[in-house]
Image (cartoon, rainbow, N blue to C red):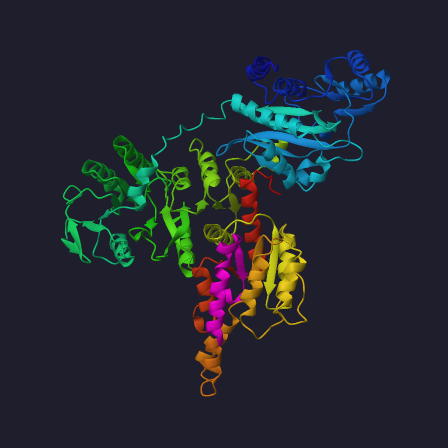
């Protein structure tokens, strides 16, 4: 049984002696106490003692300098390897002591050719993080490592391995057995637990671990200390009951506190946007100088409102916000959105103090509060709520958006409206003084209106439970996370391999993957992916059928699929025979299915259905739809085709093409497989008008991407989601 108390005593002694780190010997004694297998070794302080220890442990042996704070011994010439006998060990010890080594560590050299690294570091935002990768003296140069937040389960270990370029080294290698995943799991969780148990420990590095008979053995290790550097985590706020969020997203009555008659003020624009969005509930203004604004009744104060509104949106100057929050609570308001800026986002003590006052006012009264410094809230159903600084009003659907930036969130709404991706909920979280992204994720995890979540995150704070909430949400529905900014809170000491290889963004991405969410850096990719998750079924595998109206696009699509880790499906003979029945005799007779520019516009939906219903296909990618509709637009603009019937012919073709689009759109539900389209017509249409065929596909839930590469990236994420739900380690 590991002796954790002995490990604690070693760390306490190092702290008492003001050591920057434990010695290698003591570091490995701590690791052994936590269940990590370490090399057979002995400490020595004289050449004769080193020779005796080497003879006792066995040859070949290694002799190393050893002492507190002694890192990167190889770089300092304080390591001697492959010592064949006692005389060689004695000579090596003499040389090391002469070079200034404070003590000696003698080891039996581990037998193995594979070198790994396992480490742990403490991030101010994420807390402890663990690392696995290929080790050795060049680990920083190679950088082939993967990160997770502890604890790590068996699937997590497998996924970390699969992320490494050198993952084949973990399989059977040069006559040796595969690396024990159980031993890796034990070691990873051990280093994570050391950081959790001892806030004074900043880093744990085990480099290298030599794989001996399939078991990684720690032959060098360093535990670094940072006394007092790790503050206790911020206390997590209590979880909000999910039903309370309905006052925020489905209010039957709304009051705009600070409604204005000036189009230059947000009090006017918020009121105007709410009205323009078609809000179907009861709407009030609060302004002592007006009895009515834009046809909306106004009242001199919150207390004077004829009823306690479900939601109050505050847009008054900062000094008045705390009292307004208290007045809302006194009136019985259920939720508040503070649009006003000028609080904790500023590097100003007075502004931060004002935010603290807002927080106290909300917490004293138990008020649900979003913001301050946010862009507002939207929920198209059931009341057509678009109450915020944004001016786009996408229709109702399954996509929910949580954004720490009002601008990014507003862009997502614009994109959703343009691409006819329906929205369930939208919230701009702002400064997150009370409600944080984690709170919204917990609500959306159980929200029946939400099919998928898109979250824009700039940072998380310790104690807010972000990754726990993210995991809960991702277990219930797909979550796409767009990360903005790079954290400098996790800068690590140079003596730590783990620290030098980690980074806020890198660890954040790994933690999202661990939680089951998808982290992306490209805003367009994030929105495309979230829309696909909200509208498309998940594939049962990675086999893709491609139907193209041009040979070149089919080739590019096949390349893109393979590069993303998808499989170009091999169509069975019965599918080929079905296609033979209506395609020209010179068609490609394989996958991709090339329609060879046939004149029959209904060939496309027939071919797509034949491929979609094949048991050898898990997903379908359609290429080259919408060209006839573009031709119609060109004819209409130019006027050159009028009088000779080409415009009427093109219009007829466009109608047939639109009907084909509707048939294609129905296939996803019919066969339970995702059907995506890629077409350069998605980039724009002649005369600046939307392509009606593309619009119809998007309206019906088919994602239309601008290139096969975009489509392949979306499809592989859909496949990974299925693998996550099925408990399969993701590649």
User: Residue 658: in sight, yes or no?
Assistant: yes
Q: Is residue 423 above or below residue 97?
A: below
Residue 658 forms part of the magenta stretch: yes
Please state the horizontal and vertical placement of residue 135, each as a whole percent of the image. 69, 33
User: Closer to the camera, 361 or 379?
Assistant: 379
- Horizontally, is 586 left or right of 314 in the view? right
User: Closer to the camera, 726 or 21?
Assistant: 726
- Identify the magenta region: 653-682
| Main secondary-structure element of the magenta-colored stretch | helix
User: Residue 419: in sight, yes or no?
Assistant: no
- Horizontally, is 56 left or right of 266 in the view? right
Name the quadrant of the C terminus: top right
Q: Is residue 268 above or below residue 7?
A: below
Identify the residue at the far bottom of this view: 643
Which residue is depicted at the point 27% across and 43% down? 318
Which residue is depicted at the point 61% across and 20% down? 34
Name the quadrant of the N terminus: top right
User: Closer to the camera, 113 or 651?
Assistant: 651
Image label count:
0
- Horizontally, is 502 left or right of 111 in the view? left
Please state the horizontal and vertical placement of residue 651, each as a whole percent of the image. 46, 77
Residue 255 forms part of the magenta stretch: no
Q: Is residue 669 above or below residue 602?
A: above
Please state the horizontal and vertical placement of residue 304, each as a whole percent of the image. 14, 43
Please state the horizontal and vertical placement of residue 271, each as a whole percent of the image. 25, 54
Find residue 157 and report its image quarter: top right
Q: Is residue 495 above or below residue 267?
A: above
């Amino acid at each position: 049984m590991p002796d954790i108390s002995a490990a604690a005593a070693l760390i306490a002694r190092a702290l008492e002696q003001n050591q920057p780190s434990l010695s290698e010997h003591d570091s490995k004694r701590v690791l052994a106490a936590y269940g990590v297998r370490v090399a057979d070794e002995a400490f020595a302080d004289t050449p004769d003692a080193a020779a005796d220890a080497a003879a006792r442990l066995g040859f070949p042996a290694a002799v190393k300098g050893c002492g507190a704070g002694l890192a990167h011994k190889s770089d300092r010439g304080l390591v001697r390897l492959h010592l064949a006998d006692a005389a060689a060990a004695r000579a090596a010890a003499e040389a090391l002591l002469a070079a200034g080594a404070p003590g000696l560590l003698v080891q039996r050299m581990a037998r193995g050719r594979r070198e790994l690294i396992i480490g742990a570091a403490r991030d101010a935002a994420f807390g402890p993080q663990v690392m696995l990768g290929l080790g050795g003296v060049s680990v920083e140069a190679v950088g082939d490592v993967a990160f997770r937040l502890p604890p790590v389960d068996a699937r997590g270990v497998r996924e970390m391995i699969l992320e490494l370029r050198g993952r084949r080294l973990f399989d059977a290698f040069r006559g040796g057995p595969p690396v024990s995943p159980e031993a890796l799991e034990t070691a990873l969780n051990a280093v994570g637990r050391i950081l959790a148990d001892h806030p004074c420990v900043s880093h744990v590095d085990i480099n290298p671990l030599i794989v001996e008979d399939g078991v990684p053995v720690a032959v060098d290790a360093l535990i670094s200390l940072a006394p007092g550097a790790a503050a206790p985590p911020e206390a997590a706020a209590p979880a909000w009951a999910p039903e309370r969020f309905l006052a925020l997203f489905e209010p039957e009555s709304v009051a705009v506190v600070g409604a204005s008659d000036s189009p230059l003020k947000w009090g006017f624009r918020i009121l105007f946007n709410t009205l323009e969005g078609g809000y179907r509930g009861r709407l009030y203004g609060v302004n002592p100088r007006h009895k009515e604004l834009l046809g909306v009744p106004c009242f001199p104060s919150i207390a004077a409102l004829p009823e306690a509104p479900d939601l109050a949106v505050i847009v008054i100057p900062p000094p008045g916000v705390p009292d307004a929050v208290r007045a809302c609570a006194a009136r019985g308001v259920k939720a508040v959105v503070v649009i006003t800026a000028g609080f904790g986002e500023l590097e100003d003590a007075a502004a931060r103090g004002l935010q603290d006052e807002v927080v106290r006012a909300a917490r004293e009264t138990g008020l649900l509060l979003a913001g301050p410094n946010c862009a507002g809230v939207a929920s198209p159903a059931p009341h057509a709520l678009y109450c915020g600084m944004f001016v786009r009003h996408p229709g109702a659907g399954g996509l929910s958006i949580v954004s720490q930036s009002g601008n990014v969130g507003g862009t997502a709404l614009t994109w959703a409206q343009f691409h006819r991706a329906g929205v369930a909920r939208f919230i701009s979280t702002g400064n997150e003084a009370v409600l944080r992204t984690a709170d919204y994720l917990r609500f959306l995890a159980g929200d029946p209106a939400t099919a998928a979540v898109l979250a824009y995150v700039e940072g998380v704070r310790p104690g807010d439970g972000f990754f726990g909430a993210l995991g809960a949400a991702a277990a219930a529905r797909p979550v796409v996370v767009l990360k903005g900014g790079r954290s400098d809170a996790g800068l690590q000491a140079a003596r730590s391999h783990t620290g030098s290889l980690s980074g806020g963004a890198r660890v954040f991405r790994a933690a999202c993957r661990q939680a089951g969410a998808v982290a992306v850096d490209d805003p367009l990719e994030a929105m495309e992916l979230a829309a696909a998750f909200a509208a498309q079924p998940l594939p049962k595998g990675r086999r893709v059928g491609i139907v193209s109206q041009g040979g070149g696009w089919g080739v590019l699509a096949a390349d893109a699929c393979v590069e993303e880790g998808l499989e170009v499906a091999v169509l069975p003979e019965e599918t080929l025979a079905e296609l033979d029945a209506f395609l020209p005799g010179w068609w490609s007779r394989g996958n991709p299915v090339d329609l060879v520019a046939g004149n029959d516009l209904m060939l496309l939906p027939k071919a797509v259905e034949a491929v979609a219903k094949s048991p050898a296909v898990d997903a379908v990618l359609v290429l080259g739809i919408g060209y006839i509709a573009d031709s119609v637009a060109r004819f209409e603009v130019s006027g050159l085709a009028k009088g000779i019937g080409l415009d009427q012919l093109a219009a007829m073709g466009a109608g047939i093409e639109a009907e084909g689009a509707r048939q294609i759109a129905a296939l996803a539900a019919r066969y339970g497989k995702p059907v995506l389209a890629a077409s350069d017509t998605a980039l724009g249409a002649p005369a600046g008008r939307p392509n009606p065929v593309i619009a119809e596909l998007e309206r019906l839930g088919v994602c239309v991407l601008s290139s096969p590469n975009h489509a392949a990236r979306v499809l592989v994420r859909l496949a990974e989601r299925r693998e996550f739900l099925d408990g399969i380690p993701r590649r």
